Amino acid sequence: MGDRRQVIIKVFRKYGHSLGPDSLEFLEELLDRHEINDEEVEFSVEWMAKEYNKQDDAQMKVSLDVLQRVYETFQNGEDEGEQGQAQLDPESHLFVIDAFEMPLWNWSTERSTFERAPWSLTSSGSADSRITAMRNRLNVIKQCILRNDHFSPSTLPSKDRENLLTLRSTKQLLGRAGDRFLLFGMLAHSMEGKLCLEDQDGSVELDFSQLDQPSEGLFTEGCFALVEGDYTEEATLLVIAIGHPPCENREAARSLFGHVDFLGKGATTLLEDKQFANRVQLELPDLRFFVLSDVWLDRPDTLLGLRKMFDNCMENSFIPKVIVLCGNFTSTGIPQGNGRELRKYQDNFDALADLIASYSLIARTTHFILVPGPLDVTVNSVLPRKQLLPSFLSRMRNRVPNVHFATNPCRIKFFEQEIVIFREDLMSRMLRNLVGVKPDVKNDDLKRYLVQTILDQSHLMPVTISIQPTLSDYDHALRLYPLPTAVVLADKYDRYQMTYEGCHVFNPGRFVGNSYTFSAYAPARRESEECVLDVDLEEN
């Protein structure tokens, strides 16, 4: 034992530290606990001494508190053994985040960072908050553009700078007919019905007559675009190219703004994110989130499909951690003031509660998240939408312990991952509001274009408020910056799944008909897979 003590003292002295009796005893006890052989003592103590030395509050006389912290960090972050496995608890790292709980962070052009709004947010909003919301949309995208390699002069030698694209403003157009410009702004119609590009300094009418081929994506009124063109004597911009802004991946955004707590659940560092990601991959490879959309509870065969899904889970001993049920929870909608239909609507949720409760293991261990659809009964019809009315859900609340009545959209924070759930018939909404350029594209391309557009725009609903009203104080709940880990675009459109700029996007399809379709998301792989239940309706 004396020899070990001498080795410990010698190693710490090498780094300029002296050990008191408490610290020495703690280190000896650690070596015994981990059954370190005499030959390995010096190596193990060397590691502790180095890590201690890196701490900001490391003193020459070794502090026992700092030493214990170094050891705990090692245990939590590095140890992939049995002790680490026991500590990785999915339950304590799962949060369902309401759109109305997310803090508002505004972009500050003066400080080039996000600043938390100092005022209380309200559903009514104000004229100022509407302007702030649109300004945030523009500035969040613009700061990504200016950091992009094609636009950033600081990354290039001076001889290459002439190849850079220089972003101009509409106020720089005046008196410069015949010159070529690259502008960034929002596509909108003028009072005369002409399509214009608006930025913070003004607007210019766009002329698409010479445009051969627009870039990929869907361009709607209210989306932000990069437009290159020649300024004409008629004060219009003759467009030669139009494209969506470049998308910045999650890691790049988190490396800059990792200190910003966008979700209101505490900020984590990139190192913590990486450690969590590795451990989830190793220790929770089989964990799944099921996502279902258009769960029409007014159709008896829907409950049959859910029963089949639960039976499969029990037979295969495969209980999902989360089941997300997206509306619409009715196939027809509820006529206003129709008491009989409202009563049936409540009965349907009661039947769902009874069905879940009949599978006691699933009811006890699975988190159920209910997200309202466009036809469901909520307090408001603008985005973000509040949760389903509580008066319909009392039995659900009583019988299902882990049920969450979520807003639309909502977010799931799971360890380092952020998963956005959005239930909207987005494809038809975007296609109805295309402007300027209407690409002749095939079905598969449309899905890709929709995903690219939503992520490039950093927003779930990149249209004007006249097309889709939003609560201005809560517009940030629709923001997709930093890019989430996964986005569920639950839509009545065909199902799909794809990964763009590291963000996995999928539409689970509709849980209706004889063949029930849904998606299973695997956090360990950050991917989803299609699941299909074939139910023989004549069996029952």
Image: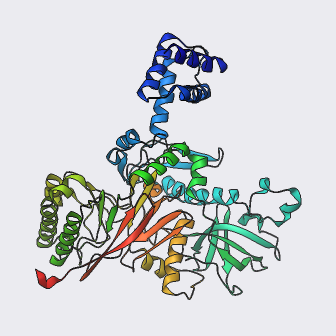
Judge left or right: residue 342 versus residue 86. Answer: left
Please say if 182 is above or below 52.
below
Residue 310: x and y, percent? 21, 66
What colouring does the structure picture have? rainbow
Residue 319: x and y, percent? 26, 59
Judge left or right: residue 164 versus residue 303. Answer: right
**Residue appearing at x 10%, y 80% in the figure:** 540
Residue extending farthest to the right is 159
| Number of disc labels | 0
The quadrant in which residue 87 appears is: top left
* Frontmost residue, 114 versus 368: 368
* Frontmost residue, 305 versus 126: 305
**Residue appearing at x 14%, y 73% in the figure:** 341
The quadrant in which residue 299 appears is: bottom left
Residue 194: x and y, percent? 61, 80
Is residue 463 shown to the viewer in this render?
no
Residue 163: x and y, percent? 82, 66
* Frontmost residue, 200 versus 63: 63
Is residue 451 shown to the viewer in this render?
yes
* Frontmost residue, 284 versus 458: 284
